[in-house]
Every structure is written in structure tokens, then in C-alpha cells.
Image (cartoon, grey):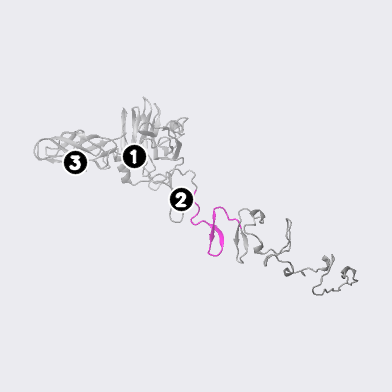
């Protein structure tokens, strides 16, 4: 019997052809695409290769369309970044409350990613971000436990007595008859040729704010005659250990004004400015009766000597009889000046005593008469030469030069014999003088002689 061919049947629309069990229908185009209604073919009607994987056949590059791709149909690491949808720069993918991936918006500048234990979000960094390091050479990063900030390092000022608090030689030093002068305020000295004038300590008005950092005093420099050559008021900064300043970028800052009238540019200059900046001159501009801050930055050359000098200077023949005032001198590493490096008064005194120390009270000038405060008073049983050890409060820079003073007359090279009508007797140093002590030798007139005297020890550079 011949097979029955479907295409030879005369069928009507909607007719169902039933094939008996074990029988097949031969031929092609039995069922056209238009005869299959949408969603009428289910997955269980598609041949399996495994239980979980449906064979879809080759799929060309492009969109799969409505075909479902379950998880285990995608191999591990099969989806590359290039196959992912685009994402706005700076966004990150996070899981949302529904467990679905979502794009977290871009945070603001300097924000950090934080979590509340459930979700993540952008927030300001706790305590803020670290501050910029620009122009912070020589400073230290400090924190209060919450915020961080740059703070100038204590002890950064290479100038000693920059606020002119200590005047062990007296608050006014007068220089007459065109003499070369030594030191005035501690660590500040004359440099150059003989001159006439004075250096004195002047008080700031309590509570003034024009010159910051609460200075108590300023220095007034008066020059009434300067015939022979330049004259300068300077501080020699000790370069110890050697080369601690060589090749360093430093900034010098100070305040200055005229005591009366305007001093033209060049009348008073900064000593060593041109050397520091590497060109030009030492001029700092006109000086008026209003306080102004001067700042000079440069790189120091290799320092072959044991010191570097800065301060004020004036040319031969230049005078300023009313004076020029100056305050708050600071020399520090870096290219930006910081607030004045404040120190306790006692610390500044000790720094000064490394270079100059006296037995007199802090406010009493050496050579004062009838001053017994701080005298050494050796008592000895024998006539003739006697000695007494004097220990310094601060170890000196070098072996110091010693000057003895009689307690009553104030004469130098003497000591007062209190048992002999307050007469002067000779007093000299013994052969041994060190950085820490000196032995004073004097000649007594008899047993139980009581003597009193003062001394100074100078180790200035």
C-alpha cells in the first residue's frame, strides 16, 4: 500500500490531521511558520543535549532577542568588559535594595566611599583630607585627633633674641666719638667702621596688633656720624654643625619703620640680601613711619666659615639721627615666612648665655657700682694669692674671655676687699679657663679677708 501524502489531501482551514502511533508523515513544508501561533512551542518541545541546556543552534553576532539565556548557559569569565553596557565615567556598580546591580553616581571631589553596614554612599572624609604640602618646607603635619594641619616646627628660627627681649649689657648702648662698637642687644653686634650713635630697647604699646605675635620690645638704631665706611647692625648665625645652612633655601623676615620722617630707598638696607638672592643690591625700599614687613628669600651658597650674617646696614656718610626701628627678626628654612617662633623668656636667656653670661642681675649692666646681687664672695684664711672656682650656668660656645669687676667701684680687673675698707685688689684668671668654669685669683691682705666681685664671660662669634 502506498503512503498517504498530506499535500495530496484536500484540507480546509482549521482541519487537524492526526497521525496514528508509530506512523510518520513524509514530505516537506508540512507546517509553515504562519501555522504556528506565537508562544505555542515550549522549551520541553526542543531537543535536549543535557537536562539543563537547550540547543539553540548557531546564533550570529547581535541580539538574541526574546530567547532566554539561563545562568548555567554562560561559561565562567565568558562576559568581558567589552561586552558590558556602557557606564558613565566615575560611576561604580553596587547592589541595590532589591538585590539588583545599580550604578552609584559619581562622588564629589575629595569624598570617600563609606558604608552604613547595609548600603554604600559617598561622604566627606572623616577629619577632612590631608592639607597641601605646597610652601610647607620645614613644617610638621599635626593632628588634634580629628583634623590635620601644617604647623611651623618649634625652634625653626636661626636668629637668637629676634624680639629683642634680652639686653644683658644694658637697655641702651651709646657709642660716642666715632668708636667701633661691640654688642648691644644680646647676639646683635656692630659690624664695619667706627660710628657715633646708639642702640636702645624701646617698648611696644601693650595690646598693639600692627606688628603681630605680641612682641614686647623693638630695637632703635640711631646713627649721627658715620664718616669712614659702612656700618651694620647684624647677627652672626652660627653654622654649627658645619654646613647646616649651606645650599639651603631660606627666608629672612623682619619688621621695620622710621622713627621720624621717611628714609629714602638705600639709606638703610638689608645686610647680605644680594648674596642671598644672587643678584641686585641690598636695598629694601623707602622706610616710612609705618611698620612694614620685609621678606627676602634665596638660596645660601656653600658656607666655608663658621657663620652666616644678616641684619641692617648703611653706607659711609649716611646718618639717621631720629633712628630706624626694627622688630621680629626671623631666619628659617623654606621659601615662605611663618608666624614668629615664640619662645619662653628663660629659654632665650639661656640661648644668649651660651655666648655671653654675667654674674649681675638680668637687668643690671656690667660695671654697675655698689651692686652685690649675684657676687661671688669667697672667704679665705690666708694672706697672699687665693683662688675660687666660678661655674657657668650654660656651657660656652668656646673658651670665653673673662672680665672681673669690683663689687663696689665697678672697676675692671679688680675685686672688692670688704675687710679692708671696700678697697680694690687685683683679680685675674688662673691659667685654667674652660667652657664650663673659670678660677678667679686674687691677693688678700690678711686672714679671714672677705672679698666680693662680679664677672662676665664672653664667647661671642
71 to 382, vertically: above or below: below
CA neighbours of label 1 inside 10 A, class few (<14), some (14 to 19), many (20+) = many
Label placed on residue 137: none
**Kind of element beneath mark 1:** strand
Q: Residue at label 1?
A: 201
Q: Residues under labels 3 and 2: Cα distance?
A: 51 Å
Looking at the image, can residue 57 be seen? Answer: yes
> Residue 187 placed where, x, y %?
33, 37
Depth check: give the residue in front, 459 or 201: 459
Q: Is residue 241 left or right of residue 40?
A: left
Where are the magenta residues, as a range? 105-131
Q: Residue at label 2?
A: 149
Q: Residue at x 20, y 40 (%)?
A: 390
Q: Which image quarter holds the C terminus?
A: top left
Q: Quadrant of residue 420?
A: top left
Residues tagged 2 and 1 counted as in contact (Cβ below 8 A) = no
Label placed on residue 376: 3
Q: Residue at x 53, y 64 (%)?
A: 117
Single out the mark in the foreground, 3 or 1. Answer: 3
Amino acid at each position: 500500500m502506498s503512503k498517504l501524502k498530506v499535500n495530496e489531501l484536500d484540507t480546509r482551514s482549521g482541519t487537524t490531521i492526526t497521525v496514528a502511533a508509530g506512523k510518520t508523515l513524509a514530505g516537506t513544508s508540512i507546517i509553515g511558520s504562519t501555522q504556528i501561533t506565537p508562544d505555542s512551542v515550549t522549551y520541553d518541545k526542543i531537543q535536549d543535549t543535557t537536562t539543563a541546556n537547550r540547543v539553540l543552534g548557531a546564533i550570529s553576532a547581535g541580539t538574541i532577542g526574546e530567547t532566554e539565556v539561563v545562568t548555567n548557559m554562560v561559561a565562567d569569565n565568558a562576559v568581558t568588559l567589552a561586552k558590558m553596557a556602557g557606564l558613565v565615567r566615575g560611576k561604580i556598580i553596587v547592589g541595590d535594595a532589591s538585590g539588583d546591580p545599580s550604578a552609584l553616581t559619581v562622588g564629589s571631589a575629595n569624598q570617600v566611599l563609606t558604608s552604613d553596614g547595609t548600603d554604600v554612599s559617598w561622604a566627606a572624609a572623616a577629619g577632612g583630607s590631608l592639607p597641601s604640602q605646597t610652601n610647607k618646607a620645614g613644617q610638621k603635619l599635626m593632628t588634634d585627633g580629628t583634623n590635620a594641619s601644617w604647623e611651623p616646627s618649634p625652634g625653626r628660627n636661626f636668629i637668637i633674641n629676634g624680639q629683642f627681649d634680652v639686653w644683658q649689657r644694658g637697655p641702651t648702648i651709646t657709642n660716642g666719638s666715632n668708636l667701633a662698637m661691640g654688642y648691644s642687644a644680646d647676639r646683635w653686634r656692630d659690624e664695619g667702621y667706627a660710628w657715633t650713635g646708639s642702640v636702645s630697647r624701646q617698648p611696644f604699646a601693650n595690646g598693639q596688633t600692627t606688628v603681630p605675635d605680641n612682641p614686647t620690645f623693638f630695637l632703635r638704631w640711631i646713627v649721627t656720624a658715620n664718616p669712614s665706611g659702612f656700618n651694620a647692625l647684624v647677627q652672626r648665625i652660627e653654622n654649627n654643625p658645619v654646613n647646616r645652612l649651606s645650599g639651603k633655601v631660606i627666608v629672612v623676615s623682619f619688621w621695620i619703620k622710621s622713627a621720624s620722617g621717611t628714609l629714602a630707598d638705600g639709606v638703610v638696607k638689608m645686610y647680605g640680601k644680594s648674596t642671598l638672592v644672587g643678584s641686585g643690591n641690598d636695598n629694601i625700599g623707602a622706610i616710612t613711619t609705618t611698620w612694614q614687613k620685609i621678606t627676602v628669600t634665596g638660596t645660601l651658597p656653600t658656607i666655608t666659615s663658621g657663620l652666616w650674617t644678616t641684619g641692617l646696614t648703611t653706607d659711609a656718610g649716611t646718618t639717621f639721627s631720629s633712628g630706624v626701628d626694627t622688630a621680629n627678626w626671623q631666619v628659617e628654612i623654606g621659601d615662605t615666612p611663618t608666624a614668629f617662633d615664640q619662645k619662653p623668656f628663660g629659654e632665650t636667656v639661656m640661648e644668649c648665655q651660651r655666648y655671653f653670661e654675667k654674674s649681675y642681675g638680668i637687668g643690671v649692666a656690667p660695671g654697675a657700682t655698689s651692686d652685690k646681687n649675684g657676687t661671688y664672695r669667697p672667704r679665705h684664711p690666708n694672706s697672699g694669692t687665693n683662688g675660687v672656682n666660678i661655674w657657668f650656668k650654660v656651657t660656652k660656645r668656646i673658651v670665653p674671655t673673662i672680665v672681673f669687676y669690683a663689687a663696689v667701684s665697678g672697676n675692671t680687673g679688680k675685686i672688692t676687699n670688704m675687710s679692708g675698707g671696700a678697697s680694690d685688689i687685683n683679680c685675674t684668671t688662673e691659667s685654667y679657663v674652660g667652657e664650663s668654669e673659670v678660677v678667679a685669683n686674687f691677693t688678700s691682705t690678711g686672714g679671714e679677708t672677705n672679698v666680693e666681685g662680679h664677672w662676665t664671660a664672653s664667647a661671642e662669634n
